[in-house]
Image (cartoon, rainbow, N blue to C red):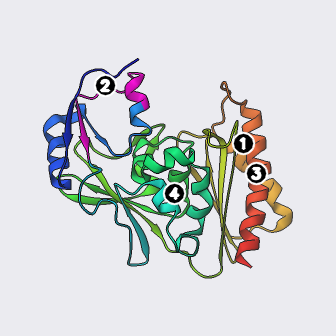
Amino acid sequence: MKPAPFDYLRAATVQEAQAALAAEGEGARIIAGGQSLVAMLNMRLARPTLLVDVMHVPGGATMGIERGQLVVPFAVSQAALLQRQDLLSEVPLLAAALPWVGHVQTRARGTVCGSVAHADPSAEIGLALVALDGTVHLRGRRARSLPAAKFFTGMMQTAARPDEIIESVSFPIARKGTGHAFNEVGIRHGDFAIVSIAAISTGDRLRLAVGGVNDAPLVRDWASLDEQDVDDALNDLAWSLDARDDLHATSRYRRDLVRRLGRKTIKEARQCAD
């Protein structure tokens, strides 16, 4: 199957891209790497009247540290972020999660902000962004920023308005003494996660983020969680999730993965923090 007809605009600036979105309304879509959107176009799950290409906008692929945050603009590919020399020390959770994103070929084209915009509940980048209290920076008629936890509103649904483009996303730089770990289970490596887990350990505080189960990433914080209490806490978390049966896994299997994978990831994060 091929896409339904659409118009195409290669934007020269962010302002031109945003103006095109505002003029076209809900029929316009931003395209960058296209690794998610093109597949939806081919299956006619998405039928935009206008595609606005932002991959050639100057400065769109330049990352940098600003005010204690790693700022990743709209045209940065997943491969470029993974290859960033200081990523492991800057944002170790991203360094752990990115190798699970798709395959080498798709990471070469797929963008970080494109994955966030797509808002697949199984996506590793969105899960890491929420776990780290990252921020999504939007450009519409005016600029605004949203915490990642408020940006994702449901399965492939976000708080972005039709005339807004994701200008960048930002991830807080890791603090000394904080441990990070990431694990997931899929049918094959590179497939969508059946369950993905991110853990952040700082002193007595522990954060666990779960992807692939609810319609959006879910975060649970514990101020103090002793080793003997981990299993009970994970069991409570597993039963609080909106786990469902589908072609890939049963709800029971997903909850069991949360328990088992959660324990493993918590242990690894605590070891990294030592």
**The furthest residue to the bottom:** 176
x and y percent of residue 91 in the render?
A: 54, 69
- Asked if labels 4 and 2 touch by Cβ distance under 8 angstroms, the answer is no
- The residue under label 1 is 239
- Residue identified by numbered label 4: 130
What residue is at 42 percent from the left and 41 percent from the top?
Answer: 118
The quadrant of the rendering that contains the C terminus is bottom right
Residue beneath the point at 70% across and 49% down = 237
Residue marked by disc 2:
47
Which element is circle 4 on? helix
Say whether disc 3 or disc 1 marks the residue closer to the N-terminus. Answer: 1
Q: Earlier in the sequence, mark 2 or mark 4?
A: 2
Q: Tell me the kind of residue under disc 2.
A: Arg
Q: Position of residue 116 (x, y in %)?
A: 43, 49
Q: Give the range drawn in magenta.
A: 39-53
Q: Distance between the residues labelled 2 and 1?
A: 38 Å
